[in-house]
Image (cartoon, rainbow, N blue to C red):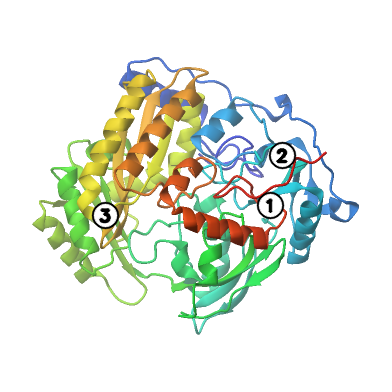
């Protein structure tokens, strides 16, 4: 899956052009799934940029901003969608119903402020765009008729580590930096942010903060919230800069208002974030369990032990088999410890003892970059977005959804969601599909279950089938007491369910905050809340 030299981002799918599955790999994947589903699958060719017919831009920037704005088909198509299944299906089919009229690439805060001023006056919606990896419709410029146009605000040119405080272990970093560049700039200092979501390669610091991203690590510092020391954002009403402190009890936290605000209150331009020394000591193990319930109980014991494993994921048998981590005969717990300060052998020994107490049988164990179940799962995890693009080409429905729940309700939630999704697949005519579950993050009081769905689709009806599954899963999650999202954010896709989850009085207070910071209601309309918008422009 190596990309061509000089390749750039795919305008319709994940990652770089040429970095996904090659033709032979895609055919073999389609063949295996055809056999598994008992349904023939046929690969379709990927779309070509030259075949797109985008509506012409409805607005033009003022002359002072022309130099940082683009209207070419590639940039408009690239910034039309995030990278959810629904997004990729539409883009693969050549459907770009609501492309941004403009794409702006500011290089400094003054240009961000100028763009916001112009957009507010011109009634142009502004959709902040980090790395474009949203899987919930968070960057789609489908803003409705109340706006004269839509501008996608790409902060990718504001991508530098500005200052490192090695004494306190923190750095001031521009929001547009993508994960790999961020780590490359911190590496000479022997430091790391230690935040590695699956989208790491194509997601930004500002995007992580705006969506309350969770990284790869299972316990302790999982959400980006805990790493934000202070931040700076530009709202149409002016800048908001919080004080840099290790902690404060001075009233409600202004950081918390902006963390998770998904671009509706302001554009995050930089942040001071807490860093870690790069780890030197690592141990890994894979533990087999006779049932998923036993694996989950072991995870609960580990979460409540104070050992704080870096990784502790429970995979049901089918999840283990589809990722190559197991053969489908057992559930697995992938366990890992790491430290920058001390060997972690004792921590691993105690972790394995806790697993054994719940019926676990240790299998492969490694302390480096060796193979086995843990490495197979990691490779599958990183490869998954590229595989998803090949599945779309084959007409396969593939979706993931995640939540968080307290431990005593986990079994009921898993059972209810699996049943609801199974019934929805049958209703959608895809009864041969399957749903798997894993636990991705652990807290002393509960885990984050993550479900994956794979099923044969009907050509031309994939989105309708997806909608049935998405609705069923979301309804079941809320009915069982879970959250509509643990780390994928709200966006436009989760908005109806988020409206049911949050207290209405809080929603009114949030709308008041938006009205103060964004009086014209131009920032990411339709996400989190509906702004008070005047009559459609003439």
Q: Which residue is drawn at 88% across and 56% down?
A: 64
N-terminal of the pair, mark 3 or mark 2, is 2
Task: Find residue 424 and name its label.
Answer: none
Is 497 displayed left or right of 178 in the figure?
Answer: left
Q: In which quarter of the image is residue 92?
A: top right
Question: Observer-nearest residue: 104 or 309?
Answer: 104
Secondary structure of residue under mark 2: helix
N-terminal of the pair, mark 3 or mark 1, is 3
Q: In this view, does 80 lie above or below 533?
A: above
Residue on which disc 3 sits: 406
Inspect this view and state whether residue 179 appears.
Answer: no
Q: Residues within 10 Å of mark 2 (few under 14, many from 20)?
A: many
Is 141 displayed left or right of 499 in the figure?
Answer: right
Determine whether label 3 and label 2 are within 8 Å by CB. no
Residue on which disc 2 sits: 76
Q: Position of residue 1 (x, y in %)?
A: 50, 39
Residue on which disc 1 sits: 521
Q: Residues within 10 Å of mark 1 (few under 14, many from 20)?
A: many
Inspect this view and state whether residue 23 appears.
Answer: yes
N-terminal of the pair, mark 2 or mark 1, is 2
Q: In this view, does 241 lie above or below 15?
A: below
Is 385 displayed left or right of 142 in the figure?
Answer: left
Q: In which quarter of the image is residue 233?
A: bottom right
Query: Which mark is nearer the camera, 3 or 2?
Result: 3
Query: Which mark is nearer the camera, 3 or 1?
Result: 1
Secondary structure of residue under mark 1: loop
Q: Is residue 53 above or below residue 245?
A: above
Determine whether label 3 and label 1 are within 8 Å by CB. no
Q: How crowded is mark 3: few (under 14 residues within 10 Å), some or many (20 or more)?
A: some
């Amino acid at each position: 899956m190596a990309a061509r030299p000089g390749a750039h981002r795919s305008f319709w799918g994940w990652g770089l052009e040429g970095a996904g599955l090659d033709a032979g790999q895609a055919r073999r994947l389609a063949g295996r799934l055809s056999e598994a589903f008992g349904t023939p699958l046929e690969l379709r060719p990927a779309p070509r940029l030259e075949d797109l017919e985008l509506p012409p831009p409805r607005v033009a920037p003022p002359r002072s901003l022309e130099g940082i704005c683009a209207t070419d088909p590639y940039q408009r198509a690239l910034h039309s969608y995030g990278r959810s299944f629904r997004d990729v299906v539409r883009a693969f089919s050549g459907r770009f119903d609501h492309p941004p009229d403009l794409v702006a690439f500011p290089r400094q805060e003054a240009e961000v402020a100028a763009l916001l001023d112009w957009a507010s006056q011109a009634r142009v919606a502004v959709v902040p765009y980090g790395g474009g990896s949203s899987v919930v419709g968070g960057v789609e410029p489908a803003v409705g008729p109340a706006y004269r146009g839509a501008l996608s605000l790409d902060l990718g040119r504001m991508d530098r580590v500005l200052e490192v405080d090695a004494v306190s272990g923190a750095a001031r970093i521009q929001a547009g930096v993508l994960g790999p560049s961020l780590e490359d700039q911190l590496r000479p200092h022997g430091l790391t942010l230690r935040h590695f979501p699956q989208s790491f390669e194509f997601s930004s610091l500002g995007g992580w903060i705006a969506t309350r991203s969770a990284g790869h690590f299972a316990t302790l510092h999982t959400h980006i919230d805990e790493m934000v020391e202070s931040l700076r954002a530009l709202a149409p009403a002016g800048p908001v800069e919080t004080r840099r402190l290790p902690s404060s009890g001075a009233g409600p936290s202004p950081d918390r208002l902006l963390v998770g605000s998904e671009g509706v209150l302001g554009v995050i331009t930089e942040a001071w974030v807490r860093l870690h020394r790069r780890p030197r000591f690592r141990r890994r193990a894979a533990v087999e369990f006779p049932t998923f319930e036993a694996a989950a109980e072991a995870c609960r014991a580990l979460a409540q032990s104070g050992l704080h494993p870096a990784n502790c994921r429970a995979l049901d048998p089918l999840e283990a088999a589809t990722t190559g981590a197991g053969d489908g005969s057992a559930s697995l717990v992938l366990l890992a410890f790491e430290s920058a300060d001390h060997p972690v052998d004792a921590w691993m020994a105690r972790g394995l003892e806790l697993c054994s107490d719940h019926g676990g049988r240790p299998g492969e164990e490694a302390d480096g970059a060796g193979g086995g179940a843990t490495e197979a799962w990691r490779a599958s995890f990183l490869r998954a977005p590229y595989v998803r693009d090949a599945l779309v080409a084959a007409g396969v429905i593939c979706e993931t959804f995640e939540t968080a729940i307290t431990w005593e309700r986990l079994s009921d939630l898993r059972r209810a969601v699996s049943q609801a999704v199974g019934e929805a697949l049958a209703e959608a005519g895809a009864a041969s599909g399957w749903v798997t579950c894993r636990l991705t993050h652990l807290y002393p009081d509960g885990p984050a279950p993550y479900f994956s769905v794979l099923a044969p689709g009907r050509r031309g009806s994939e989105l309708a089938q997806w909608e049935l599954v998405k609705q069923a899963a979301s309804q079941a999650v809320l009915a069982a007491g879970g959250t509509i999202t643990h780390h994928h954010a709200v966006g436009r896709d989760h908005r109806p369910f988020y409206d049911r989850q949050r207290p209405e009085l809080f929603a009114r207070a949030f709308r008041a905050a938006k009205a103060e910071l964004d009086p014209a209601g131009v920032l990411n309309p339709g996400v989190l809340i509906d702004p008070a918008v005047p009559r459609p422009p003439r």
